[in-house]
Each structure stands twice: as C-alpha cells, then as structure tokens.
Image: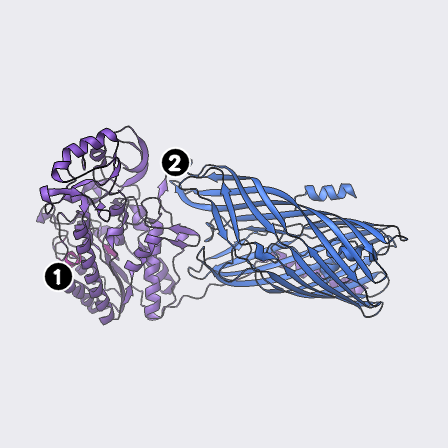
C-alpha cells in the first residue's frame, strides 16, 4: 500500500514535469555545401535594389530579396551585406524624382473617390541623389540599380552626371566608388565576391514600360557579350559560385494587365456618338463595354480597336480616359500606353531568347539557374505559402507592390526563396528558406 | 447531484486534441484501462460505454469526474526552419452519470452528461502558420437519458436519447496589414445543438466472458447563427463585413465491439475495437450572409477518413479497497497525408494509461487515471502549403468520485 502510494506520488511528480515541458523539434543544421558565402554580391535591377511602390525606400532596401538571402547566408558563415541605404526618415524617391506610392483615397474627374495608389508627397526625396554614400557606407554588396540593363552593368561612368541628364543613372551615382569611372561591374569586382547573384530584367522591362514606343530591347549580341563578361569578371575576381535568374514574362505583370482593354462603357447616346465619329473609319461600337480606340500606324486611318490580348499600361492618364475622351471620342490612345499583339510577341520572343542564353551561361559556368519565369508564371494561377494565397493581381494579389512592376516585401521573400532553392539544389547546401509570412504585403490605410 | 452537473457545465469545458476531435475520456476506470469498457461493465459510465450493460450493474450509483488535460505542441517548418510552440490551454472534459433501478426489476434507468468531442489549439500570433490558424476551440456536451433492459441473465439491451450541444470558435490572421504592421483577424464563433442516440447490446455467455456492442449515431451540428467578426484596416471594412454565417459540422457516428474477460476475482481484462465515421467530415465550410468580391465562403478541405482504435486494458484488485489499472491503445488517425492542419495535428499513435481506484466505504469510492499521448506527424498540407512536423505531448490526469446507494 505504502509502496503503491509512493509510486503514484513519483508518477504524479514526473507527470507534472511533463505538463510544463514543450516538445522539442530542432531545425536541421544549415550546411554550406559548396557555397562560399563569405562575400556575397548581388547584381541586378530595381528588384535587386529593393525598389518598390514606385521608388527606392529604406523599407524596400531592407526587404530586397538579396538582403534576405544574405540573412540566410549568415547561417552558413556569410558576412555582412552592405547596402547603399537611404535614410530611414526619407520617404524615398522614384526614377525621375517621383514620389513613392501608397494606397490612399483619391477623387477622379467624375467625382468618384476610390482607394488607389497615390503619391506619398508631391515629389520624391531627391536629396538622396545629392550626396555619394560610398565614402560613408561603401563598398556595397547590393549592387542592384534600378534601370540597369546588362549593357549598363558593364558601362564605365554609368553614374557620371557629366554625361548629361538622361545619360546617367543617379541611383548609381550615389553609390558608385567613382561616379566618373565606375561601372556596376567594376565596383562589384572590387568587392572580391566569393558568391554572386544576377537578376537582370531591364533589357526587356524598360522597353515594355515605354509601351514599346521608345527605348529598345538589348541586341542578342550585346546581351550575350555583357552577360558573359559579367560572369567571367566575377569569377576572375574570386567568385566560386553564383546564381543567375532568368527573365519573367513581364507583360503579365500588373503594370500591363490591370486596365481592361474593353473599359469603354457606352450608353445609348454615347454609342450613337461614337458610331457617328468612327463608322466612316471602319470602327463600330455597341451599347455596353467596348474596346478602346488605340493608335496603330499600320492600321487603316492609323487607328483601330484594341484586341483582347493587348495591354494598356498602368501609367495611362486615367482622368483623360474617363473625362476627356482619350481612347474614345477625343483621340486614340497613343502607342506609349499600349502593348500590341506584335509588341507582346516580340517581347516574349526576346525573353525566350535571353533565357536560353542565360541558361547556357549558367550551365557553362556551373552556376545555379533560377527559373524566375516559371515562378512568376505560377503567380498567374496563384500560389499559396503557409496559408497565404498570392497571385499576380494588382493590389489584391498580395505579391506586387503599388507600381505593378516591383514586389512588396512578401513577394521579395518569395523571390529570395526561389534563389535559395536553386542554390541548395546546385551546390548541395541546406540553407533554410526565408519565412515569407514574416514579410508584409500591400499596406492598407 | 444536479447542482454539481450545473457547476461543471458553467465552468466552460475546453477539450484536448485527441483522435480527430474525439475525446476518449468518459470514465476514470475505463481511462485507466486505455479507454476500453464496452464489454466490461464497471460502473455508471456504462451509460456512455454500453447502455446494454447498464442493466447488469449492481445497485444504484452516481459519479462525477473531471480530467484536466494539458497539451503542449511544437511545429517545425520544413522549409524555413522556424519553430513555434502552441500554448497549453487546460481543457477540462468532464462526466456525470447516474444509474438507478430496483434490484428486482429487469429495467435500469440512467442519465449521463459527457463531452465526447472537443479540441483546443492555440498558436502564437506571429507563428508561420498564423494565416491558417491561431486559435481553434470545439466543445460539445452530450446529455443522455437511458433505459436498459435485462432480457435474460445473459443478455442486456439499452438505448439512450442524446441531446448534443456544440460550441466552436475558429480564429486566423488575415494577410492584410495596416501601416503600423497590424494584420487583420478573422474570428468565427458558433453554437449549435441536435439530437442523436446511443444504443448497446451486452452479452455474457459465461461468468468470465462478456461481449458488448454499441452504436452511437452521428450528430450534425447545424450552425444557423454563427457570428463572423473581421478586424481589418478601415479601408477594407466594407470588403470584409462582419456578420452572421451558417455552417455544418458532423460529430461522427461510432461503433464499438468490446470484450471483457474476468480471469478471477481479482484480475480482469477489457478490449475494445472501435470505428469512428470521420469520413463524414469532408469540408468545413462557412457561408457568410454578406459576401463581397473579397469575402467568399470559406472552405477548409479536411477529407477525413474513418478512424479506428484498439484498446486493451487490465485491472487488478490488490485488496478489497485498492484496485490498479493499466492499458495501452493504438489509434489510426482520420487525418490523411496532405491534410494535417494545426487545429488537429493528429497522427496514428500509441497511448499509455494507468489508473487506481479506492473504496473508502461501501458507499464511497474514488478513481483516478493518467493518460499520456505522444504524437509526431510530418506533413505537407496540400491546401495551405504548410510543410513541417508537429509534435504534441498530451497529459490527462483525471479523478472521479462515485456514490453507491
């Protein structure tokens, strides 16, 4: 009896200990495999720089995919990741001095108020371009520069103001070791990187964002030569590994897919007016939703109706469309706001061409190949990460930032994970992915 | 007696993760023997375990019991290596049984109040799976008046009408954030009630051997008055209107075959084989009264399969006053691969139990038991894309008192 009670007492004591203890699950140790992450340098365009919501901001830089990769690299002996940070107190600045965007209420020309991206201020904080941060903060591991095409990455003096407005990149000026002589690549090489990532989309993007009306797609020869020169220079500087991402189909980004081609809603009298105006030029309208009228030099009379697989750009002046007859009674939508079927097919052909060049370069140089095109493709149908559903819809899709081109923090984290997966697969490392749920989506007021 | 029952109900019982949402804590003697008790008539808990055997109980009795339940869970994300611990809210499944009938009569009447289904899971507000779940509570209380009839000295039958009430809360973080970094919260609460039954057959071919067969019907909780509350940034308030919702949650049917064997006056064994109709739980759906383009019905795919359990227990009377018990059970989880969720990170499992009973007098007795479960399950949830390992310790020490008259 006494013995039994004693046993019961002991059992109760050990039971109460169990009540207090939490089950232990230990994450597997991160192993480096063949990755030497001592000095990691990232080269790329706006996403690499941390550009988002139409501008370069401190928050965006903190959440750049390369900064997140560098955070995971610390688990396998990676060093610090230096970025050309703008002050945390600054609202940041977009290309051309524009203010970054936030979601806010704006009233359009018809008096309707809605929740849309609006500038945080009248203009961006252009003081960020005023001073070089190289001396105080450089050299930099994040060599991402908004607007950097492959050919620009290798161009000395890419940040040289002496070239004159429009002929240099002020985002690079502020971070270059020597604005007059540095190229993005030469500064990257000076870091003696042991590992690098490359993600270049601007050879296509700048042209697409111009509605294929200006700028141009980099030639195959120049793209190939620049890419190979970038890779061979980094290897010569001591890089023993790297990852290179291919180019997503940018025409499916929200900047191109948000405004409907058939947003011209006509009631009875408008319909009569439009038919009066355009029937003589071979265009016919019906009551209800109609395609917009766009300029097309190859069409008879230089204009035609938009087709369902063509895209209007997000920077089209919507008030002019809604109230001043742009795309309807006043005039056709100019080419700079439209990607036509032909232009889209040219862009896609160039992407396919560049991607085969990128894949060949990855394979020839033993680099991890990141199929970013396929990742962005999966956003078309939608993906789920730990219960968070994401897709490529503007604002509601949760992945893209308010400029419709760059990503918000959770999108950047998903991008980092694409790199990490490819690096692990190529180099036999077991670097854990970023917990993307810890990064926010679009901020709502 | 009535007062005690009322008190227990008011103390707002919270239950544990068990097999699916099932709680196998319906009697301390049986708990000590791994939950087996369909074929071996022990006490008034037979109202739950086998209404057919109630007529075979000696005398009249009443019992109340409670099993505070401690659950500690941990999740390790296979992709990002993050670790989260679920809180350990204490659940308190309880039981109250009365059995009465003149010894001269072949009839016995019983009443039981018990908590057959329940679950509680509480994860941190910042864990990696918070967009799937931060809090889930399901509780049910069944009230069961019962009649049992001894057909002959070897055979008894019994039936109980069950009135079941249920209470559910489901809370998740919404992936919308304001400028201060506060995420939205969806909080769904509902109560429901419905009727069912519990029937049993008890057959005692010899003095040593007894066999029981029971069937408890499914009770479908029809939620007509659920309340959904969405806390979101002000600009989204009209996209996520708080308001009523409807839903349907089946608390499944269950069949058990039990065998009891009395080796001698001191030693006896009980074995139960049990099937639970979890296949009825396919999708948990919430239909909101007010929907918007952003707020569509929530459908949580569960695709449960029927669950099985095998329970073996033994008890030994050390002397007239003291009895010790032990048991082991093996349960096959209703949760298929690809469907493991943080609300019930269930797994096939072995659980061990032990118990002790003490008779203070010919009228008063007490029984205590301890149940321990250790679950581990690795899964890549198909709909959530949440990939990782859950590990859970559950400890359920319980106590009941019995009064015989």
Residue A172 visible somewhere in the drawing:
no
Which residues are the magenta region?
A: A142-159
Residue at image mark 2: B235
Between A148 and B381, which is closer to the camera in this rendering? B381
Determine the secondary structure under disc 2.
Answer: helix
Colour basis = by chain
Q: Colour of chain B?
A: blue
Question: Decide: marks 1, 2 in contact (CB < 8 A)?
Answer: no
Q: Position of residue B138 (x, y in %)?
A: 60, 48
Q: Colour of chain A?
A: purple
Q: Residues within 10 Å of mark 2 (few under 14, many from 20)?
A: some
Viewer-proximal residue, B79 or B330? B330
- Quadrant in which the N terminus of chain A appears: bottom right
Residue tagged 1: A222
Residue B60 image offset from top left, x and y in percent = 85, 51
- For mark 2, name the chain: B
Discs 1 and 2 carry the same chain letter = no
């Amino acid at each position: 009896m006494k013995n039994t009670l004693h046993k019961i007492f002991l059992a109760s004591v050990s039971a109460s200990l169990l009540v207090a203890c939490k089950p232990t699950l230990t994450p597997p140790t991160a192993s480096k495999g063949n990755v030497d992450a001592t000095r990691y340098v990232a080269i790329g365009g706006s996403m690499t720089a941390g550009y988002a919501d139409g501008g370069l901001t401190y928050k965006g830089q903190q959440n750049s995919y390369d900064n997140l990769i560098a955070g995971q690299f610390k688990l396998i002996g990676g060093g610090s990741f230096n970025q050309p940070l703008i002050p945390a107190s600054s609202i940041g600045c977009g290309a051309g001095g524009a203010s970054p965007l936030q979601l806010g209420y704006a009233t359009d020309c018809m008096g309707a108020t809605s929740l849309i991206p609006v500038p945080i201020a009248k203009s961006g904080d252009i003081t960020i371009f005023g001073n070089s941060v190289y001396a105080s903060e450089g050299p930099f591991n994040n060599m991402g520069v908004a607007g950097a095409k492959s050919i620009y990455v290798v161009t000395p003096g890419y940040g040289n103001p002496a070239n004159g407005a429009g002929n240099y990149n002020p985002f690079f000026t502020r971070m270059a070791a020597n604005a007059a002589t540095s190229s993005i690549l030469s500064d990257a090489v000076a870091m003696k990187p042991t590992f690098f990532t490359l993600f270049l989309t601007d050879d296509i993007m700048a042209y697409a964002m111009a509605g294929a009306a200006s700028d141009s797609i980099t030639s195959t020869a120049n793209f190939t030569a620049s890419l190979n020169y970038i890779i061979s220079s980094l290897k010569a500087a001591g890089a023993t590994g790297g990852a290179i991402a291919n180019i997503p189909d940018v025409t499916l980004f929200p900047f191109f897919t948000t405004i409907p081609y058939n947003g011209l809603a006509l009631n009875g009298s408008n319909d009569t007016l439009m038919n009066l105006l355009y029937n003589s030029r071979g265009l016919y309208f019906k009551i209800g939703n109609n395609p917009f009228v766009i300029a097309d030099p190859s069409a008879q009379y230089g204009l035609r109706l938009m087709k369902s697989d063509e895209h209007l750009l997000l920077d089209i002046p919507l008030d002019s469309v809604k109230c001043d007859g742009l795309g309807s009674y006043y005039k056709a939508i100019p080419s700079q706001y439209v990607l036509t079927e032909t232009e889209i097919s040219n862009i896609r052909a160039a992407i396919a061409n560049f991607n085969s060049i990128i894949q060949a370069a990855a394979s020839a140089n033993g680099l991890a190949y990141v199929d970013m095109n396929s990742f962005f493709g999966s956003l078309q149908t939608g993906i789920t990460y730990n219960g968070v559903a994401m897709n490529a819809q503007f604002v509601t899709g949760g992945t893209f930032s308010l400029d419709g081109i760059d990503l918000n923090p959770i999108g950047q984290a998903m991008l980092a994970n694409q790199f990490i997966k490819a690096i692990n697969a190529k180099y036999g490392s077991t670097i854990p992915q970023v917990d993307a749920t810890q990064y926010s989506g679009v901020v709502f007021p | 007696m009535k007062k005690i029952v009322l008190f227990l109900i008011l103390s707002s019982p919270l239950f544990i993760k068990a097999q699916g949402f099932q709680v196998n804590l319906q009697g301390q003697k049986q708990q000590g023997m791994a939950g087996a008790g369909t074929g071996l008539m022990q006490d008034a808990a037979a109202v739950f375990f086998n209404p057919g055997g109630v007529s075979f109980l000696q005398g009249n009795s009443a019992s109340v019991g409670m099993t505070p339940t401690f659950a500690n869970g941990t999740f390790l994300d296979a992709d990002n290596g993050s670790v989260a611990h679920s809180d350990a809210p204490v659940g308190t499944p309880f039981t109250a049984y009365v059995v009465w009938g003149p010894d001269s009569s072949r009839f016995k009447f019983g009443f039981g109040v018990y908590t057959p289904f329940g679950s509680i899971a509480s994860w941190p507000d910042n864990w990696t799976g918070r967009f799937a779940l931060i809090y889930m509570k399901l509780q049910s209380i069944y009230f069961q008046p019962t009649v049992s009839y001894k057909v002959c000295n070897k055979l008894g039958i019994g039936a109980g009408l069950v009135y079941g009430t249920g209470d559910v809360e489901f809370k998740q973080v919404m992936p919308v954030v304001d400028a201060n970094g506060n995420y939205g919260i969806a909080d769904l609460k509902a109560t429901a009630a419905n009727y069912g039954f519990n029937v049993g057959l008890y057959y005692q071919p010899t003095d040593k051997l007894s066999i029981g067969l029971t069937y408890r019907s499914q009770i479908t909780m029809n939620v007509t008055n659920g309340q959904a509350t969405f806390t979101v940034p002000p600009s989204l308030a009209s996209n996520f209107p708080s308001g009523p919702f409807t839903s349907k949650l089946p608390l499944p049917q269950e069949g058990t075959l039990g065998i009891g064997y009395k080796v001698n006056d001191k030693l006896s064994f009980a074995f139960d084989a049990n099937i639970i109709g979890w296949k009825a739980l396919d999708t948990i759906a919430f239909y909101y009264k007010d929907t918007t383009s952003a707020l569509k019905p929530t459908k949580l795919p569960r695709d449960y399969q029927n669950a099985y359990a095998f329970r073996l227990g033994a008890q030994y009377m050390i002397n007239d006053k003291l009895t010790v018990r032990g048991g082991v059970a093996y349960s096959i989880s209703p949760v298929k691969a690809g469907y493991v969720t943080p609300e019930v990170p269930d797994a096939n499992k072995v659980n061990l139990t032990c118990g002790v009973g003490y008779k203070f007098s010919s009228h008063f007795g007490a029984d205590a038991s301890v149940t321990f479960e250790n679950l581990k399950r690795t899964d890549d949830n198909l709909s959530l894309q949440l990939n990782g390992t859950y590990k859970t310790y559950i400890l359920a020490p319980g106590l009941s008192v019995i009064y015989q008259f």
